[in-house]
Amino acid sequence: MSDLRLGVCYYPEQWPESMWQADARRMREMGIEQVRIAEFAWSRMEPSPGQYDWGWLDRAVETLAGAGLKIVMCTPTATPPKWLIDAHPQILAVGADGRTRAFGSRRHYDFSSPEYFEAAGEISRRVAERYGQHPAVSAWQIDNEFGCHLTVLSYSQHAVQRFRQWLAKRYGTVKALNEAWGTVFWSMEYRTFDEIDAPIGTVTEAHPAHRLDYRRFASDEVVRFGRMQVDIIRERSPGRAVVHNFMQLFSEFDHYALAAHLDAATWDSYPLGGLEEAWFDAETKARWLRTGHPDYASFNHDLYRGMSRQPFWVMEQQPGPVNWAPWNPAPLPGMVRTWSWEAFAHGAGTVSYFRWRQAPFAQEQMHAGLNTPDDQIDLGGHEARQVADEIALLPATLAQPRGTVALVFDYASKWLFDIHPQGADFNYMRFAFEYYSALRSVGLDVDIVPQDAPLDGYRLIVVPSLAVVSEAFASRLAQSDAQFVFGPRSGSKTESLSIPSNLPPGALAASMPLRVWRVESMRPNATLDVNYHGKPGTARHWREFVDLPADASVLSTYPDGGAAMIRHRNLLYLASLFDEATTRAVMHDAARAAGLAVEQLDDGVRLARRAGLTFVFNYGESSYAVPPDATLVFGDGQVGPQQVSVFRPAASRVELNQDAASVAAS
Ligand code: GAL
């Protein structure tokens, strides 16, 4: 038995019972070992208040277990049923426009509603009591995609009341709050916590510190709600992993804080839908239309691996076209396999496809499954089968990957810069991704970590930006001899979203004695020419005006002579955001300075190392030659478009098992 396993998401309540047995058998035939069920089934578990119907779910569990499948049971709290909403209309969340959200889709609840906290706890207890000890139940998923459809923030009366309590706890006195926020500006001073409302509906922008604290509060509410379910399940289902399925590049709450309570972080991977919905320009979207961007899924893998106690999973893997993006192209043949292997290469324990069969009804009827609605195996299903066969060619146990570079990713920085973008396209997520992508394009393995993670062992630490640099981070940095790269706006704010008294980079100035005395943002078509080691490039979006110490070296300047890239000892500070080629050259040189081996890869080719194996992925159109003295485990020596190969580099050559050798020879 391998450490790597395939799973699938299945909805027995959506199909006639007469189909279940054949479905279960065919899952096994496809090489699937695990099935996730019941996350949207509340109206069938409890058709009316207090009247539970477990018969159908008992039979579904027995059928799946009988076929030898492991079951990931879910709490159904993403979809409170109609009778519950009618009994307690205050469960419904309230949008920033002040309007109450309606029943009729999903995720309509307010994290701060005491009635919902109670009801969600009760149904979680019931499911956990019913199935917690079942031998086939191997793991639990709580709820489904916290925050999906932008549902973290709610502005209900319940939320506002809890926000006031949260503020009182954080500040102690309202005087302290007034001082921290700076409410004297525009006569916004409060006399009691009860005077403070949600930061919406104001004539022009609400106070930024007020908005930031509302986001911190809302994030804490998600964690509190998730934790309640985790505790209920742990007590009733010992020995099973409790997980949640996070979303791709989603930052509306602090995922590190919730993951700390879970056994494993899992996430839902939709590379084509994600590309369509993200910030990429039209040319980039067209280029990677049917493959996804080569760094999109892996950014998420590396992020969730870092916060997961056990190996992370992909809970939902895109199997074909989805239905929810503005355009929904079909993946090129080979991409479902490529995405699956990429997840395993980056450390996933499980890759689970969404969904077993395309549903011919309701909201997602245009979303592919592993099977078509008339029950024929779809292209994704055939590729899943191939992955299952290939898993058998790898050693049964694979150690977790470990990156040589740490990239510090910080949810609060995203919130701060969303509140104070200063330029319409200043998007922290995008810039973090661009730095990551540059590192990956020179063949580096990256760990994405929070600012309080141990940084020992990394030779290169890249900080796309860290809005608030804590004294603790600054002092660890001062003691480190690793190479650091900091992006603009690092140390530019205090905890309460003010400018630090010494000006940016705030606490970072202890190691990087700069003074950023002015900034400007620039329209997309207004860029500044720069030059980096003789190569022309552009500074985009953002420019800082910097005073620097005499012993700093300037690696690149703006046309007016101002410093655009500054090196001081082991720190490099980037006072702008640069074009792709320049960013790549900067990361390449930083890695060299750190003593790391780099390799210039063709666009679209990516490498990942795990357990002494190198995985090659080709999202592009060229081909990659596996080193001739390497030992192929599977795939070809010339890795063509949409192909995957796995090899063992010569230095650590070991005897392959028979199967692997015969595949390599074929
Ligand atoms: C996910 C969600 C699933 C399904 C899927 C469709 O966001 O968890 O329930 O809606 O998207 O791609």
Image (spheres, rainbow, N blue to C red):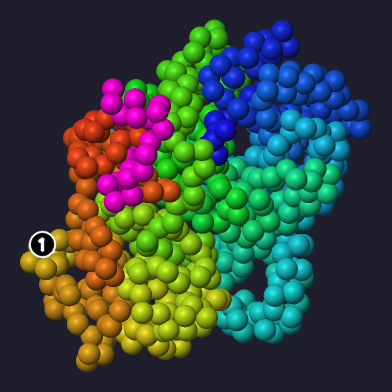
Q: Is residue 622 above or below residue 348?
A: above
**Closest to the observer: 630 or 432?**
630
* Residue 181 seen: yes
What residue span does the magenta drawing correspond to?
Answer: 643-666
Instruction: Tell me the quarter of the picture where residue 15 sits.
Output: top right
Which quarter of the image is occupied by the C terminus?
A: top left
* Residue 506 seen: no
Q: Position of residue 532 (x, y in %)?
A: 14, 67
**Closest to the observer: 447 or 57?**
447
Disc 1 beta carbon < 8 A from ligand 1? Answer: no
Q: Is residue 269 above or below residue 211?
A: above
Give left or right: position of 658 versus 528. right
**Closest to the observer: 408 or 616?**
616
Amino acid on which disc 1 is placed: Pro
Q: Residue furthest bottom?
A: 550
Q: Position of residue 237 (x, y in %)?
A: 80, 43
Q: Position of residue 307 (x, y in %)?
A: 56, 56
Q: Is residue 661 magenta?
A: yes
Dot 1: few (<14), some (14–19), or many (≥20) neighbours within 10 Å? few
Which quarter of the image is occupied by the N terminus?
A: top right
The residue where tag 1 is placed is 536
Rendered residue at 48%/62% (across/down): 449
Q: Is residue 652 magenta?
A: yes
Rendered residue at 58%/53% (across/down): 308
